Amino acid sequence: MTRTTILWHRRDLRLSDLPALTAAREQGAVIPVFIRERKVDALGAAPAWRLGWSLEAHGAELEAVGSRLVLRSGDALEVLRTLVAETGAEAVYWSREYDPVSIERDSEVKAALREAGVEARSFPGKLLWEPWEVKTGQGGPYKVFSPMWKTMKGEAPGTECPRPRELAGPADWPESESLGDWTLGAAMRRGGEVLARYAVVGETAAQERLRDFVAGRMHNYPKGRDLLAERWTSGLSENLTYGEISPRQCWNAAEGDGSETFRKELAWREFGWQLGYHFPHMFEREWREEWSRFPWKDDERKAEVKAWKQGRTGVDVVDAAMRELYVTGTMHNRARMIVASYLTKHMMTDWRVGRDWFADTLIDWDEASNALGWQWTAGCGPDAAPYFRVFNPASQAEKFDAKGGYRERWLGSGEDASRFYDAVPVSWRMEQGRDRPAKPVVGLEEGRKAALDAYAARDF
């Protein structure tokens, strides 16, 4: 076949189990393209930095099968129109995204290209099941996780698409912009060099990470995943974020002890995107509308919020977690709940403040998981923890970091703790061993009481 198809990459930077790629190959020549458009430019510092590394890795994977990655910047529709004109491509394929901005963009692109006589098709690839496929008995979307999980866990997500050994390209390749000129990591400044020590980038590395987890750690995942100082989690959220591995590959690889718990965590990721697709207000506003009247604070807590961001609240496990975030671009999931509870309840701070900080600092930032997680902890989200459930950082540390190894790793004098000072802005004026207060900026009992008093006095 002689047709040429443009494969428009977004968060699907892999060759294996990619339905859009499989369909494009069946048509003939494939031109893989990534566009630096408005959504890319809106990324926070750490996600943008990590995306740059993923694009570099994917470019190398493509070259290994005889292809290449074409980079262009600008409005997505205009870039695609230009590429169609330059290459004579008869089709544009892509993997679906499910947030409101992407849906609006993709709908516009699809309509305009089809009107111009170009085949425009979208494919699954980001999720195990499309958001409209998993339904309640009444035919609507799930709003509570447990019944959705009961539906999902007995289902198989299907057979994976094969990885091509070679990928045919056009006779004449269109010009590509330089990834180096994009300077996607510029906002990270000196922190990028530190983060590079911890990131696990690209499809090949993601597959190795999955194999290592299944073979060596998954058996103890149900018990070990909450232990802060021990390495029992998969770490795959980073790779899932950029589509370096598919959730179907993760699901299908999970067999034996611990597999159901691991698959359940994949289902939580699905739950976030199911909700985001059907109820897009979740990304910006309280899921439960009545919580829009709750007296969250932001400007009144500037000093405390700054201390939270900088890992110097005086609460050991909170500060350790926030420093892990700044050094590695990730944070243990149990720690995420602890720091989120401290911010939204002890500090009474608007959950969006935390959401935005994570969006700037997480290399595994996922729009739906981030919004769902923050609202779940704050008490205003779907299937949320009750507001009166206030995590006690001290008891959480005692339970999940009993020997103090996690706190020592990030607050002590070792290499990981020291790297925090290499990563943070000089303007923070932080000095190792002398930058944390003697007592918490918001006391644990004081904060808990204030949160519960506000909950009791709510007007809804």
Image: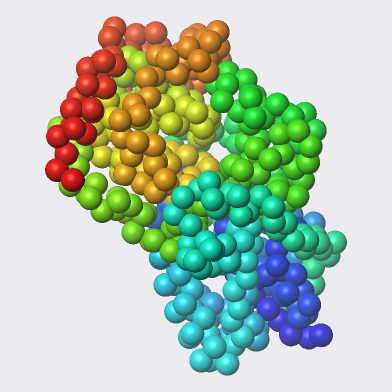
Between 311 and 81, the one lying in front of the other is 311
Residue 42 % position (x, y): 39, 55
Q: Quadrant of the C terminus?
A: top left
Name the residue located 24 percent from the left edge and 46 percent from the top edge. 291
Between 279 and 433, the one lying in front of the other is 279
336 shown above or below 109: above
Residue ranking furthest to the front? 137
Badge count: 0
211 shown above or below 371: above
Name the residue located 64 percent from the left edge and 82 percent from the top edge. 91
Q: In the rendered view, does 188 fall on the left or right side of 32? A: left
Q: Is residue 251 visible?
A: yes
Name the residue located 49 percent from the left edge and 73 percent from the top edge. 106
Residue 401 % position (x, y): 52, 15
Q: In the rendered view, does 421 fall on the left or right side of 245? A: left
Residue 285 % position (x, y): 29, 53
Q: How is the image coloured?
A: rainbow
Q: Is residue 54 visible?
A: no
Q: In the rendered view, does 133 fall on the left or right side of 439? A: right
Residue 144 % position (x, y): 46, 50
Q: Quadrant of the N terminus?
A: bottom right
Name the residue located 18 percent from the left edge and 32 percent from the top edge. 456
Residue ranking furthest to the right? 165
Between 375 and 197, the one lying in front of the other is 375
